[in-house]
Amino acid sequence: MHGVNAVYKTYPFDFNPVAGSSNSLTPSDAAEMASLGFDVVRLGIVWEGLEPGSTEDYAEPATAADDNSKAICTEGLVNGAGTAGPGGSDSQYNQSTLQAYVTAVRATVDLLASYGIYSLVDMHQDVYNAHFAGEGAPDWAVCTNGLPPTNTGNWSANYFTPAVGVAFDHFWDNDVVGGLQQNYDAVWHQVASALAGDPGVVGYDVFNEPFSSEIGTVAGNAAFDAKLECFYTGTSTPGEQAQTHAPLLCPPTDPAVGAIPSIESGDPNHLVFYEPDVGNDFGDANYIGPMPYPNLVLGFHDYCLASAGQAYFDFYGSPACSGPEQTVMQQESAARASAATRYQPGGPAWFMSEFGAGEDTTDLTRVAGLANANLLGWTYWQWKQYEDPTGGSTEALLRSDGSVDPVKAAVIVQPYAQAVAGTPTSMSYDPSTHHYSLTFIPDPTVAAPTVVFVPVNSFYDVYRSGYCATVSGGTSTTAGDKVLIAADPTARAVTVTITPGTCLG
């Protein structure tokens, strides 16, 4: 799959199908996405919107006075025994509020699906909460031991301020009576249950870019990843350590049923995308081990910190980025293999759910090329600017005037295999020459054709004088912006090439 992110991070935390609003995602948007060959959107939802709590007032500015409720943040086990009601701290959960939010999300999912685009529903956060110049957790779930928020003026630097570290630590340790993880897991269960029957959903992204104050050293990353894995699994069916495959010992304060089984109990059919800690976005090792559940996908991001002093997501074509971005791919490939279980003997699938976030074509070309070399799907960050408080200033693919940015599109809008009747072995695309190549081992039991998208109907013409699709080991036909390939009955391998110009002979 190729696609884009669409995340609206402030109230109302969802999308409006009417053009002209700051949170618009319209039929025109969906049609434009489809014309670019995009078949998936990583669609953001926000915990604060799902479970704002009984005291939230969006008409008033967020203040630290809303944090550190004694009823929530007093340290101790939930309900004195490590269990919780439907929403952890029952006073914060409201079924009608959650259902109204999910109804809005489903409307966007169905709109996208009507244009052939799947939704990867992503519970998004950055810097935990709005008081830290971020988004994600509701105010009642902010427990900082009384430390006030510090705003450095750079949202990404706020991660390393004391109050943010304490707030995250209380979430991962799950050591307050309000039951932060119990609330989070219960909300996910409700969302998955509501969307379980929607064919437009491809899966759920459990937690965006998990952060902890422990991140920064190898030992710290490994220690936090153990906590993160326990958050995913819960104490009743814990996973294994990544390197030793010994059973993971989870803190007794964690819920018995973690986030992944909470989702899968609500929706056993769609995929569940789990992310490693945020340090992996920049090349740190992934210590998330095998987890005993089906339908898992390792979702990860690939970014570079060589940002010349700008916000972390305003990138430049620094040659220093080449090594780290390739390292990210290598680290996640290794982590995927080491996470094999009886449910997924070859390891979980993998997917690059964020990259880009800028206008530098050197960086975009490099990461998209790495994805092709690894036969990897992706979603670019992001479709529109959406008043993003925690992103880059040049991240949007769709400009403010409603037109697609031609510089970025010339790199990331490309031919790619949307479905393969067999096992793909290689795929490449050169945006400077527009030469595309796909090789796969055909499966004779698959009757459907291999499908390669070719960008001929988009706002700019990649193949102005037409294109030639050549097939070795099979035959091809053209259907609009698709090339359909049928393998020869005796072919052991099929190679598809697409080049500009018309075929000779």
Image (spheres, grey):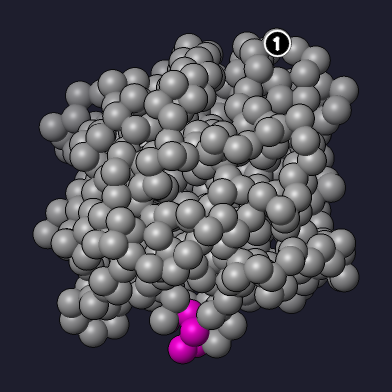
Residue 417 found in image quarter: top left
Task: Decide which of 159, 164 is in the foreground and name it.
Answer: 164
Q: Which residue is mark 1?
A: 18
Q: Report the residue that reaches farthest toward the front.
A: 70
- Identify which residue is drawn at 53% across, 58% down: 70
In the displayed structure, 268 sits above or below 135; it is above
Q: Position of residue 193 (x, y in %)?
A: 29, 29
Please tell me whether the stretch drawn in magenta is mainly helix, strand or loop.
helix
* Horizontal side, residue 489 vs residue 318: left or right: left
The stretch of residues the image draws in magenta is 218-222
* Horizontal side, residue 426 vs residue 161: left or right: left
| Amino acid at circle 1 | Val
* Horizontal side, residue 428 vs residue 64: left or right: left
* Horizontal side, residue 9 vs residue 133: left or right: left
- Identify which residue is drawn at 13% across, 32% down: 445
Secondary structure of the residue carrying tag 1 is: loop
131 inside magenta stretch: no
- Identify which residue is drawn at 29% across, 35% down: 270
Q: Dot 1: few (<14), some (14–19), or many (≥20) neighbours within 10 Å?
A: few
